[in-house]
Image: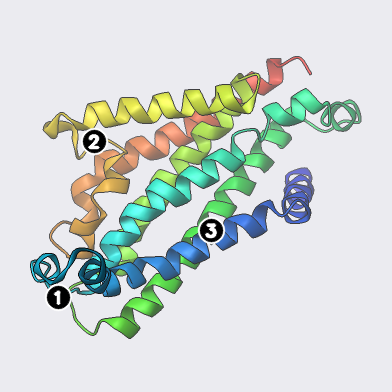
């Protein structure tokens, strides 16, 4: 565990020096501000660009519109940016030969994988919390209604899906020769989940539902326990993906 701590610290410091963490924080901060802003001023934007006739067909915005933007933008923009920036987390270091000296000096390969898994999951958690708090604050400022009672409950499934996606990115980076191949593997997995979700009966079993059905939790029209199979499968897959990344890394030629 001591080795995991120090290598994770090294990863975080490197991310800060290369401005990767700063870029992630900036992206998620912008998303946090943009979500309630779009919800509040979209009717005015439409009125200015398309005329009063179009604007009059749009109902008055509520807090639910702000959170709708949140659950659209975070998976479609925030997570995509995080995946793009993390896709070479292992393959890039192997190609650059930066791990050779560390491993020949006794650093275990599983320590590398676990540290990188911890690093990207912590980054995801911090970025999600940042954009959540910013969106929440501005939503309370712009909208004083009770249409979004379960903010924290609704965001938890999205966090779980993000952990699953980061675990997938880790394995893909360990398997692939470069970040592009890793992105293809990650994208292929997500496409499969989308295809499965087209079958309505699989909704409560599909981990993708944890990132697409959040509004039902927000409005209190569904409970987390209704989707327990998706939570269980996401947790098992995350552990399996990280474990597989360790096995692949142990056999990888540096």
Q: Position of residue 193 (x, y in %)?
A: 31, 30
Return the mark for residue 205: 2
Q: Position of residue 135 (x, y in %)?
A: 39, 71
Q: Position of residue 236 (x, y in %)?
A: 41, 34
Q: CA distance from mark 1 to mark 3?
A: 28 Å
Report whether residue 208 is seen: yes
Q: Pick whichever of labels 2 and 1 is earlier in the sequence.
A: 1
Tell me the mark number nearer the camera, choosing from 2 and 1: 1
Q: CA distance from mark 3 to mark 2?
A: 31 Å
Residue at which label 1 appears:
60
Dot 2 crowding, Cα within 10 Å, few <14, some 14–19, many 20+: many
Q: Residue at x 72, y 48 (%)?
A: 8
Dot 3 crowding, Cα within 10 Å, few <14, some 14–19, many 20+: some
Q: Pick whichever of labels 1 and 3 is earlier in the sequence.
A: 3
The front one of 191 and 119 is 191
Residue at which label 3 appears:
27
Q: Position of residue 206 (x, y in %)?
A: 26, 35
Report whether residue 160 is seen: no
Marker count (numbered): 3
On screen, residue 40 versus residue 129, left or right, reads left
């Amino acid at each position: 565990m001591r080795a995991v701590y120090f290598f994770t610290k090294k990863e975080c410091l490197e991310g800060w020096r290369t401005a990767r963490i700063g870029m992630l924080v900036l992206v998620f901060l912008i998303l946090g501000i943009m979500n309630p802003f779009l919800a509040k001023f979209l009717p005015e934007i439409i009125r200015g660009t398309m005329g009063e006739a179009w604007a009059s067909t749009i109902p008055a915005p509520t807090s639910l519109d702000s959170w709708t933007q949140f659950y659209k933008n975070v998976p479609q923009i925030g997570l995509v940016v995080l995946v793009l920036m993390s896709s070479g987390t292992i393959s890039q270091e192997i190609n650059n030969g930066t791990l050779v000296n560390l491993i020949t000096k006794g650093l275990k390969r599983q320590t590398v994988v676990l540290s990188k898994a911890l690093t990207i999951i912590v980054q995801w958690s911090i970025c999600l919390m940042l954009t959540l708090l910013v969106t929440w604050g501005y939503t309370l400022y712009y909208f004083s209604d009770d249409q979004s009672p379960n903010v924290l409950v609704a965001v938890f499934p999205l966090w779980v899906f993000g952990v699953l996606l980061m675990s997938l990115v880790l394995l893909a980076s360990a398997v692939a020769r470069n970040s592009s191949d890793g992105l293809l593997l990650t994208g292929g997995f997500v496409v499969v989940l989308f295809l499965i979700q087209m079958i309505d009966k699989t909704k409560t079993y599909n981990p993708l539902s944890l990132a697409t059905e959040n509004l039902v939790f927000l409005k209190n029209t569904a409970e987390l326990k209704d989707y327990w199979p998706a939570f269980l499968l996401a947790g098992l897959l995350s552990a399996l993906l990280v474990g597989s990344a360790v096995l692949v890394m142990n056999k990888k030629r540096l």
